[in-house]
Amino acid sequence: MKNKIKKMAIYSIIILAGYLAIGYLFHLVIFPEDKPAFAGYFKPDDSFYSKAEGIKQYVEKQENGYVYCFTEIEPLAAGPPPHIHSTFDEVFEVVNGKLSIWVDGENREIGPGEKLTVPKGTPHKPYNPTSETIRTKGTIAFPERFAYHLPQVYGILEEDPELAYSPGMLLQMAMFTTSGFDSYIADGPPVVVQKIIGFIVTPLARILGYKSYYPKYDSIRQHAEVGLHGK
């Protein structure tokens, strides 16, 4: 019985290794995705907006691998789902109003001139329970690979909100995370497990037609009117 289990385990490892080797060969080498470069993708005063989250980002600049953004958070905005960034801290500095941020099970509130740094690996979620539009300063510096995918995520979920609750979301997020979108659900498996799952299912997602970049969602990234972000 032990020998049978051992053989099955060896065969499974060989099959998985073959699937990953062939899958990534096709995905990255033979049929690489046609998409713009990360560097230089954003221009000053570009903006990208999530209607579901009630959050709009305004780009100040992109340099040295980071995209610096001002943010507007609409009245009664639900914000993003609780999530985790594994490679960068997220900084919130408020210009006006009172911003609420759920941080690792604790609700925090920061006002004008106050700053809150959420360390990498910490579950968090900004939201606005007030009737006032809240603005933050341009202290948020997203890694460019993360910022690059935000308009894509926003566009997909605006076009098909139900995708978020379907198995297809796992496949789509695998494409994003293996391409540099460092955001993982806080109420799911440990981040390392989510990364492993994403790595494994990416070749399958690509075969099924999922991508890490869709040109049609560039429309989510628009050139903003100067002055809206309240520098």
Image (spheres, rainbow, N blue to C red):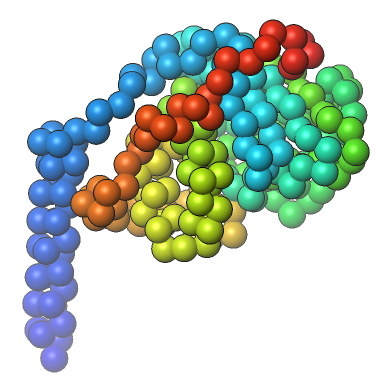
> Is 65 placed left or right of 3 in the picture?
right
- Name the quadrant containing residue 133: top right
Q: Quadrant of the C terminus?
A: top right
Where 18 sits versus 177, above or below? Answer: below
Where 201 sits versus 40, above or below? Answer: below
Q: Position of residue 65 (x, y in %)?
A: 45, 16
Mark yes or no: residue 149 visible.
no
> Is 71 placed left or right of 186 in the picture?
right
In this view, the residue farthest toward the bottom is 1
> Is 210 placed left or right of 221 in the picture?
left
> Is 87 placed left or right of 111 in the picture?
left
- Name the quadrant containing residue 167: bottom left
Instruction: Please give the name of the residue rendered at 84% of the width and 20% of the height, measured from the top-left corner.
Output: 95
Instruction: Please give the name of the residue rendered at 33% of the width and 21% of the height, measured from the top-left corner.
Output: 36
Tally the marks: 0
Where 44 sits versus 214, above or below? Answer: above
Q: Position of residue 138 (x, y in %)?
A: 69, 16
Mark yes or no: residue 12 visible.
yes
Instruction: Please give the name of the residue rendered at 83% of the width and 38% of the height, measured from the top-left corner.
Output: 75
Instruction: Please give the name of the residue rendered at 81% of the width and 48% of the height, measured from the top-left corner.
Output: 107
Q: Position of residue 106 (x, y in %)?
A: 79, 51
